[in-house]
Amino acid sequence: MPTSSRSSSSSSSSLRPTEPAGRLRGKVALVTGASSGIGRAAALAFAREGAGVVLAGRREAELQSAAQAIEEAGGRAAVVPADVSRPGAAAHLVKETVGRFGSLDIAFNNAGIASYAPIEQLTEDDFDRVMATNVRGVWLLIKHEVEAMRAAGRGGVIVNTSSVAATGSFAGLSVYGASKGALDSMVRAVALEVGGDGIRINNVSPGVIRTAMTEVLPQEALAPLAAHAALKRLGEPEDIAEAVVWLCSDGAGFVTGQSITVDGGYNIAGAR
């Protein structure tokens, strides 16, 4: 067997950088739903990897708190309050991002809402409200993000938050599950449209994550959900954030048009 001329000590030291790799250094990221949960965790993770971050959402005080945490750690952040279901919000967010930081390289379209109820109890307003944020709002964000990325001519990455409810489900999720299934179909079509411009688009599909949506549930309801996962725990927002950072990095440079499940093995035996 051939041997290397380099000593083991010099080889091992080269594998231990003294500072973070900064996988996203010099990039600009837009994060919607950034005031809490997965969006906040992703914004902080982007900043740790060197990206400038625009935080968008409906709760300005929480956005400012996250931005302050980024800046105190030496990162770059800007806050743009917005409700992505409102007319003109998507175009405004993209314009503000480019105006404040000069480019848009990464977009994490994470804002979403849920509606849990048996179908006969849901109303047309419930349906329209969920679809306005989870489908139309994301579609419009993608539309304007792609336009900005193509205009800049340097490619880019878009990630949307889908859900294991797109492929499995629970009773009461007829509207929410349908909205996330639409996203899974959407990224496949858009990936074919934009791949030639160096733009990648994927979804991340979380399982049951400890966020404000799950914090209202009693422990006796959460325990069986954790037990159903292969890893025997609920996910944390940081679990999803790390997957999103990877999807936005060069390490995932050959991944597009996919919906990546990050659920601790929850969906292996079917969501229920």
Image (cartoon, rainbow, N blue to C red):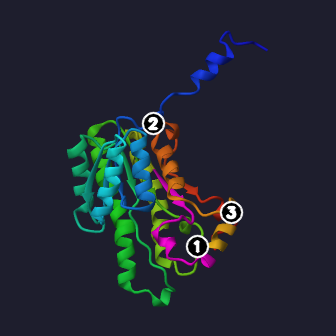
Query: In the rendering, which numbered label is found on residue 232?
Result: 3
Q: Residues within 10 Å of mark 1 (few under 14, many from 20)?
A: some
Residue plotted at (32% across, 52% down)? 67
Which amino acid is tagged 1?
A: Ser
| Secondary structure category for the residue under label 3 | loop
The nearer-to-camera label among 3 and 2 is: 3
Give how far apart the Cα atoms at labels 3 and 1 are: 19 Å
Q: Which mark is residue 169?
A: 1
Identity of the residue drawn at 45% across and 36% down = 23
**Neighbourhood count class around disc 2 (C-alpha, 10 Å): few under 14, some 14–19, many 20 upward:** some
The magenta span reads 202-221
Real-space Cα distance between discs 3 and 2?
A: 30 Å
SS of the residue under disc 1: loop
| Residue displayed at 44% across by 78% down | 115
- For marks 3 and 1 on the same chain, the one whose residue lies earlier in the sequence: 1
Percent coordinates x, y for residue 126 in the rendering = 39, 81
Residue that badge 2 annotates? 23
Image marks 3 and 2: residues in contact by CB distance under 8 Å: no
Question: Could you tell me residue 8's position as x and y percent?
Answer: 68, 17
Real-space Cα distance between discs 2 and 1? Answer: 35 Å
Kind of residue sitting beneath label 2: Arg
Q: Nearer the viewer, residue 266 or 221?
A: 221
Q: Residue at x 40, y 53 (%)?
A: 108
